[in-house]
Every structure is written in C-alpha cells, then in structure tokens.
Image (spheres, rainbow, N blue to C red):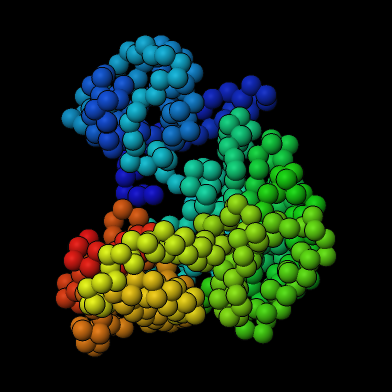
Amino acid sequence: MESALINPNELEHSRIKDPESSKEIKFLSAPALISSVPPWSLAAEIGLEPGDKILAVGEQKLRDIMDFNFHFGQSDELELLIRKANGEEIIIELEKDPDDELGVEFYTPLFNGVQECANKCPFCFIENQPYEDTRESLHLRDDDFRLSYLHGSYVTLTNLSFSDRKRIEELRPGPLYVSVHATEAEVRNLMLGRKKSKPVLEELSWLDSLDIPVHTQVVLCPEMNDGKHLLKTIEDLFNMRDKPVVSVAVVPVGLTKFHRAGLRRFTMDEAFEVVDMVQRWEAEDPSRKNFVFLSDEWFLMTHTPVPEQTYYGDYPQLEDGVGMTRLFLNEVEAELARLDCFVTDVSRNDGESKRVTWINGKISEPIVKIVAEKINYTLYNYFLNPICIDSQFWGTTNVSGLLTGNDIYQALRYIPKEMLGEKIIIPSVMLKEGRDIFLDDMSLAELEEKLGLPCVKAWGAEELIDTICKVKASH
Ligand code: SF4
C-alpha cells in the first residue's frame, strides 16, 4: 500500500443510518484513483482514463474497492461522479448488464488509507528497525481487516470500529487471517502490548456466526506464550475447527539486532521441544491432522527434515512461511524430471560447465545445498554455486526474504568474478513486488552495477532452472 497515493485533503467524513439501531455509521471516504484502463474495457468505452478519480457511484461515497464493487454491482443504470486529471468534475450515466465490470485498475484497493495498528507487540518487526535505512512501505503498522481479506495479511481484530463490524456483518469477507498468539486473555494482551482487548475466542465465535472462515497464526515467543500456553491455544482453536478456524500456523519470533523490547529467540533445544510438543499433540488423535502447522523455520533451525506434502494438506498457510520449502523441493524434483530428457539430448554434449551463483539466507543452507546438488547432477553442463549468507544489516541468521542488497554486495564483493560465474540469481522473495528493490532500498540494477555482473531474479523452481539455463540472457 502506497500511503502517498492518498491525498489527506480529499478524505471526507460521511455518515449513514444504521437500519438496525439508532446509531449512525460513520466512515471516511475518498476518491478512487484509476491506474489503468484496458482498451477493451467498459471504462475505455465511456472515456475514463488513468489519473481520473471516481468520487461516487450514484450517491454512494467510496471507502475502498469493496464499496466500489458492491455499489457498481447494485444497479444496471447508474451515475459515476468523476474528477478528471485536470480537476473538472463530470457525471457519466451508464447502462450496463448485471454482470458487466468497469474493468479499471486502481492504484490502491483502500481509497481512504490503511487502518493502522493500535497494539504494541514487543516482538513487532516494524517497531524494531532502523527507519532511515529501510524502505518506506516497511514503516506502516497496518491492522486492517480489508487487507486481511484482499491480501491475506494477518490482523488482530483489536481496532475494529462499529462501522468496521457493520461492514463485516454485511459483506462477510472471507477467509480472514487472524493473529491469535494466545487464547488466554492475559497472555494475549501481553503479546499485543495491551492492557485489555476483547477475548479472541469471542471474536472468533462472532466470525463463525457470520460463516466467515478464519486462518490463524501464533507468533511464538520463549517464556511468553509457549509451553502450556501454546497447548491451551491449540486446544481452544481445535475446539473451533471449521467453526470458524480452518488452520493454525505456529511461527517462531524473529528478532534482529535492532530489537529493544528485551525478548530473545528460541534456542535450538527449545525449538526441538516445540516441534516435539506440537507433533505429539497431533499424533494423539488422527482427526487432528492438517490443522496446526509448524512454519518452515522450526525445521530449518533444528536441521530436521521438512515434512512431506501430506503434512501441509492444500498448503493453507503458505504466505506465512508454512510449506514453502516442501513445495519448492517438490517443484525442483518435478522440473528436473521434466527437463531430464531435454538435458540429456541437448545440454550435456558441449562439455562446457557454465557457472551461476545463487543467493539465499543462511538458515536455508542445508536445503539449498541439496537442491544445488540435484540441479548440478541433472544439468551437468551448468554449475549452480549456492552462497548462503547471514544478514549484516539485521545482525541475524536470516530467512532469504530479509537479506538486503548491501548484505549481498558485502558478501560477494571480494569473491573473484570467475568464482561467481556468469550471473547472480536472486530469489524474488528478497525484492519488493513489481519494483525490484531490496529492503534497504537498493535496486537490483544498483547491485548489478556494483558487482559488475548480471543479477537476475527468479521465483520458484521453474524460473530458477530456466534462469540457470539461459546463461546468456539478461533480466
Ligand atoms: S499487531 Fe503487533 S506486530 Fe502487528 S503491526 Fe501491530 S504492533 Fe506490530
């Protein structure tokens, strides 16, 4: 979410009458800024252009894309109030079929800005970073149920206004993703840095009454919500299985050298205990399968083999780092099997070994080495050289997604070019989507210039292998 796209002068307080009570529903609306108008769209037909703003659909002011879709779909004949890029305001009358879509894209799905977080979690990554050295989008502490629905972001539900609750009851957006952390009120409040909050089990029951499925997460901190508290949380959430809780992701707290709230990470022994406890709980009853998921980090930090695909079911918590490693390993196998015939016939016969370097976070090293060996065995005219690095910037052994551009530059700058090979492959997870910049604001192009070697991003096994094989291609 680019907060800079919201003009504070255009925000407008609106009210509507709540039909179920004497209360008024107050909300903040704002124009919907159009970013693109495909030539085939209804929007192009009626003369809309990028940069135009939709101020209202009929009489209805807009808060976000959910409002826009709802009001646009309500009637076959409607008026759009438009502010053109030159400031002129016009009304466009529109007749359409019930299923017609306007077909535009907006710069942001939330026209009135993002709902900020009202908590003070001691483990908050956003609170514990050097603001001047990280990109702006990392500074926003959002806790907005709309982003939970639209993008799968986790929310705590601690800042829901009367108006938000009314909307959830009306729109029933699902699934939602809820940070539970603990079901005991005292422990949860400690985790959220709050004096009080509405009991999370009550909130989940409310979502169940609306038939909204919920994925949950527990960020686990040593001596705070682990041990018997974790077991209680798992039991409580299991009692609500599918009513509305679909899954629980258990993720270890990640702390960097900038952390100031006095927490600590799990030791390897403690991490083993967590893995053992959760796995034993699951093994006690076959009906518990595919409900609680340990994130990949638990297996990587304890050097335990990652579970097979059956453990992850249909990977409901992939975005929370649950099952990415298994999925990637399986994709590599599938890709190599698919390529095996091609490789035997074409690539194995020129005798030249082309070297390519592949960067990852240190925590993934054992897995990355296995993958590189498999790739090098099959694509034996190529040599994939994995380099796994710690982050100097964050001062930790990190997952790949947290490596910065400068971390990579510092790790590679003194390695002779012939050792690095023809290019550097950067997992896309290290870059901001669509912008190709690292967490420290260094761009991929800048890294390439500094290293004097092509740096190419790759997402997933297929792109990784394609990128290795295209040794002469540039990004
Ligand atoms: S809910 Fe907690 S972790 Fe999330 S942004 Fe707010 S303070 Fe940070």
Q: Residue at x 22, y 68 (%)?
A: 471
* Relative image position of residue 299 (x, y in whole percent): 60, 74
Image quadrant assignment for residue 445? bottom left
Rendered view: 346 above or below 221: above
Determine if residue 12 is in view: yes
Q: Residue at x 24, y 27 (%)?
A: 39
Rendered view: 29 above or below 295: above
Quadrant (top left/top right/bottom left/bottom right) for the C terminus: bottom left
The foreground one among 66 and 101 is 101
* Relative image position of residue 150 (x, y in whole percent): 49, 43
Image quadrant assignment for residue 221? bottom right
* Relative image position of residue 291 (x, y in whole percent): 70, 56
The foreground one among 458 and 251 is 458
Rendered view: 136 above or below 276: above
Q: Is residue 251 left or right of residue 67?
A: right
Determine if residue 166 is in view: no
The foreground one among 348 and 143 is 348
Q: Is residue 125 left or right of residue 180?
A: left
Q: Residue at x 27, y 31 (%)?
A: 37
Q: How many marks?
A: 0
The foreground one among 162 and 279 is 279
Q: Residue at x 67, y 53 (%)?
A: 247
* Relative image position of residue 386 (x, y in whole percent): 37, 78
Image quadrant assignment for residue 274? bottom right
